[in-house]
Amino acid sequence: MAHRGEGAAPPQPLLAPRELSADQRYVLRSLVERQEDARGEALFALGYWAGCRISDVAWLRMEHLHIGPKVGWVHVGYKGGKTRDIDLLNSVRRPLYTYLQHADRDQDSAYVFSSQRAARFTEAGIHHWFRSLKAQANKEEWTLIHDITFHDLRHDFAHRARAAGWTIEEVAYYLGHVTKKGTPAIQTTARYTQVSREHVKDKLRLISG
């Protein structure tokens, strides 16, 4: 009698979400700064410095944004209705505050990010903006960042948070990896922080006899 699954291909391992190199991070931040685009700086900050999903950004409403000269937190979580309140680094608060004061923003829009065509800057629009940003890179920069997506910024945030000492539970909450019961979805977050040989090699030196 054949066993269930006999002859079936073995399950493929899940690949760890992307961790950017120091050079890739530097190039992306430099490209954003060189554009001198208030909206672009705010978009990038939410992905890179807050780990927001592109849907979190595209559907972010003004009523859910609490930004001032010294205050910075947002209510996010469009995907799956799993909302959360997260505090923001100054690296996010400052560009958001600047963008909100910008003359080009549609002051009548209920959404934080608008475009010339619509009251809401869509996910497709954000993807297009990110591709256009990368297109400004020189040849050397392009080789480093050509295949990076906006979602990779979220992945890299998780890696940097773990490197800074966050627990997996803390990363899960901040990124919105939660179960239907509201508890941290550790398995999902663990994919973002898979251990590498390099990480273990660095820790070997900490072991004493």
Image (cartoon, helix red, strand yellow):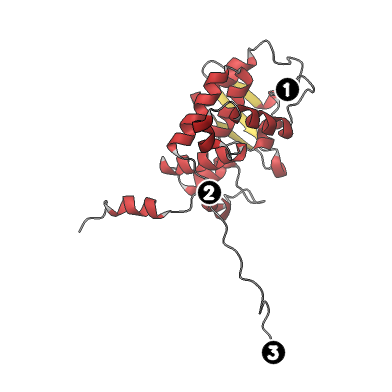
- What is the residue that sits farthest to the top in this orientation? 103
The location of residue 24, given as percent across then percent down, is 48, 35
Left or right of 124: which side holds 186?
left
Q: Amino acid at mark 3?
A: Met
Q: Residues within 10 Å of mark 2 (few under 14, many from 20)?
A: many
Q: Amino acid at mark 1?
A: Ser
> Which labelled disc corresponds to residue 1?
3
| 133, above or below 202, in the image | above
Q: In terms of sequence position, does the residue under pointer 3 or pointer 2 come before the other?
A: 3
Left or right of 20: which side holds 176?
right
Kindly identify which residue carries mark 2: 192
Q: Quadrant location of residue 126?
A: top right
Q: Is residue 70 visible?
A: yes
What's the CA distance linking mark 2 and mark 1? Answer: 30 Å
The location of residue 194, given as percent across then percent down, is 48, 53
Q: Is residue 49 visible?
A: no
